Image (cartoon, rainbow, N blue to C red):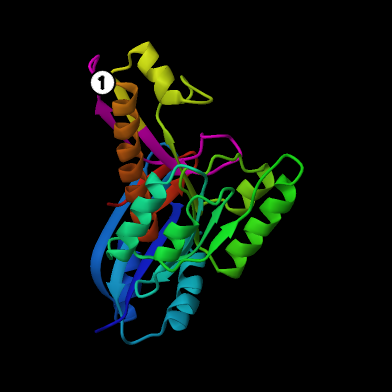
Amino acid sequence: MNPVYTLTLSCPDRLGLVHAVSGFLLEHSGNIEEAAQYNDTSTGLFFMRVQFACAQHSFDELQAELAVFAASYQMQWQLHAQSQAMRTVILVSKEGHCLNDLLFRWKSGLLPLDIRAIISNHRDFYQLAASYNVPFHHLPVSASTKAHVEAKQLEIIQDEGAELVVLARYMQILSNQLCQQLSGRAINIHHSFLPSFKGAKPYYQAHDRGVKLIGATAHYVTADLDEGPIIEQDVARVDHSKTVEDLTALGRDTESQVLARAVKWHSEHRVLINGHKTVIFK
């Protein structure tokens, strides 16, 4: 079977870009299996994702040729080998629904991940991690240890060569410095009540206000708390008959599904950041 690659790119829009990219792949014996593009007329930027098979050139050769080709178009681009699962580190606190869901989907072959480690400020899920044979790092956080813990977290992430960091209900605010170091490769999930119901027990607050919709948002982590580029969102309808426990259970299900979709699209290189927004080639 021929090696399959995914090329993602963005650049200033101009005539002939699709032709140029497809022509480059043809010249290098690349057989296009999937392609999608988007022109953002508000910014003048062009985005493209191409999945192609190529047996005539190695990954390194394609990288070198692409660097020359892309320079003349001012392209920002990435090339990924489909055979390489995305190395991932997961951060979690005391709510395990998203962690459990990601681990199950990964082991079921539904997510192209290589989960290298789980980091938590609590010990609650060390047995769950062990059951999936994933290293578990317990790093308690306090105001006095936050900087030291973040340095250790980053060390683990770097040692594992992680391309993706998932905050699966990790209830600690990351420093601006760590957010910058993880820019474009860290995904967070939160309930969609923000900013309406901040703080503890948001589902209790929502129940008390009689909300009719609950939901979840998955987004990239930035220094602006819960305001990074959105990858996926979903909602579920509720009514007066739902208890706090009903809202909480439904909210957790929604959070798990939204995060899983965001992680899947990111790991398949379907998400391109476009300023404060995202372009997603599903």
Q: Is residue 16 at least partly visible in the picture?
A: no
Q: Amino acid at mark 1?
A: Lys
276 in relation to 75, above or below? above
For mark 1, what is the residue? 242
- Tell me: 250 left or right of 169: left
Say if the magenta span includes residue 281: no
* Mark 1 surroundings: few (<14), some (14-19) or many (≥20) residues within 10 A: some
201 in relation to 276, above or below? above
Boundaries of the magenta span: 216-242
State the residue in front, 140 or 271: 140
Residue 130 found in image quarter: bottom left
- Tell me: 210 left or right of 159: left
The residue at 46%/77% (across/down) is 65
The residue at 41%/32% (across/down) is 191
State the residue in front, 232 or 35: 232
Could you tell me residue 215's position as x and y percent? Answer: 33, 31
Could you tell me residue 29's position as x and y percent? Answer: 29, 81
